[in-house]
């Protein structure tokens, strides 16, 4: 679907934090499902860890063409299977999670974008509203892009008996109006939003101009076999 223009310091810092946590588990092997550009795969390989990425259309070095629901791997053949910011891209998340669990020996590291826990602050609510607004345009263009899955939705996809540890890493900084506009351009690609969407968008832009729209953070789940 192409890279989002919001490739900010925040995005990079969240990805680094995830990679650090995976490496801290001292794995001997990592299968990264929905590997994107292969950053985690490269980081693992640089640390001497056997690593492979999975992408539906394939990718660069170390990223194989396959789907999350049919992993080319035997049962418990990888220490950790990782899905970072992938669940809301999956048409069949339950199948994909079951498949990841099948091939994982130690467990899963899962992350989903997240604006906050419990009752959200005004900035977090605005960030979430902007995220949903943009995803609606993606969907109208025919791209599968579900709203982000929360903690309970992710937990419901996990196998019974799995031991889960959660951590929320807040985003840093606020969306600027220019970033919002660039993101809209990326999602719209010529689509004209409906009139009621335009009025919501104006409110979001005005909030961004006042520095009130929180950037996204990340919800991390370390899921281990008992
Ligand atoms: C937001 S990106 C995250 C990329 C990377 N994990 C990262 O953290 O930078 C979501 C990725 O999931 C991939 N994806 C979507 N559906 C998938 C599927 N059915 N099987 C495997 N990967 C999938 C997309 O191609 C995309 O690269």
Image (cartoon, rainbow, N blue to C red):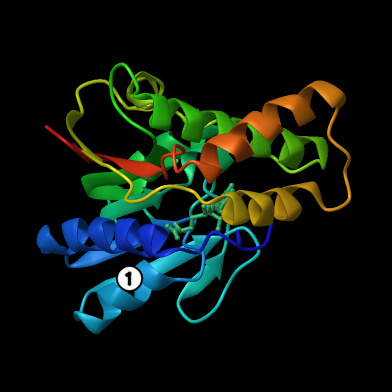
Q: Is residue 37 above or below residue 181?
A: below
Q: Classify residue 116 as left or right of residue 48.
A: right
Image height check: is 20 above or below 202?
A: below
Taking depth in this image into account, of 32 and 138 the one nearest to the observer is 138
Foreground residue, 162 or 207? 207
Residue 47 image offset from top left, x and y in percent = 19, 79
The residue that mark 1 highlights is 51
Left or right, residue 104 beside residue 33: left
Q: Residue at x 57, y 73 (%)?
A: 59
Disc 1 on helix, strand or loop?
strand
Can residue 146 be seen from the camera position used here? no
Residue 109, image x, y percentages = 28, 47
Residue 168 sits in quarter: top left
Please name whichever residue, 183 or 89, is drawn nearer the observer in this view of the structure.
183
x, y percent for residue 172: 32, 51
Q: Residue at x 27, y 56 (%)?
A: 18
């Amino acid at each position: 679907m192409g890279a989002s223009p919001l490739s900010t310091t925040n995005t990079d810092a969240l990805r680094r934090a995830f990679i650090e946590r995976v490496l801290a588990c001292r794995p001997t092997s990592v299968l990264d499902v929905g590997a994107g550009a292969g950053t985690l795969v490269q980081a693992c390989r640089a640390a001497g860890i056997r690593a492979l990425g999975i992408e539906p259309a394939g990718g660069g070095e170390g990223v194989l063409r396959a789907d999350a629901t049919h992993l080319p791997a035997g049962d418990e053949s990888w220490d950790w299977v990782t899905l970072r910011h992938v669940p809301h891209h999956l048409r069949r998340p339950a199948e994909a999670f079951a498949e990841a669990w099948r091939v994982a020996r130690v467990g899963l590291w899962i992350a989903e974008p997240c604006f906050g826990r419990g009752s959200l602050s005004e900035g977090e609510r605005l960030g979430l509203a902007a995220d949903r607004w943009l995803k609606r345009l993606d969907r109208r263009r025919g791209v599968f892009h579900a709203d982000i899955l929360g903690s309970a939705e992710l937990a419901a996809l996990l196998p019974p008996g799995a031991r889960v540890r959660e951590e929320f890493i807040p985003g840093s900084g606020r969306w600027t109006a220019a970033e919002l506009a660039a993101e809209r351009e990326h999602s719209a690609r010529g689509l004209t939003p409906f009139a009621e969407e335009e009025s919501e968008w104006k409110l979001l832009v005005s909030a961004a101009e006042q520095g009130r729209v929180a950037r996204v953070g990340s919800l991390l789940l370390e899921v281990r076999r008992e």
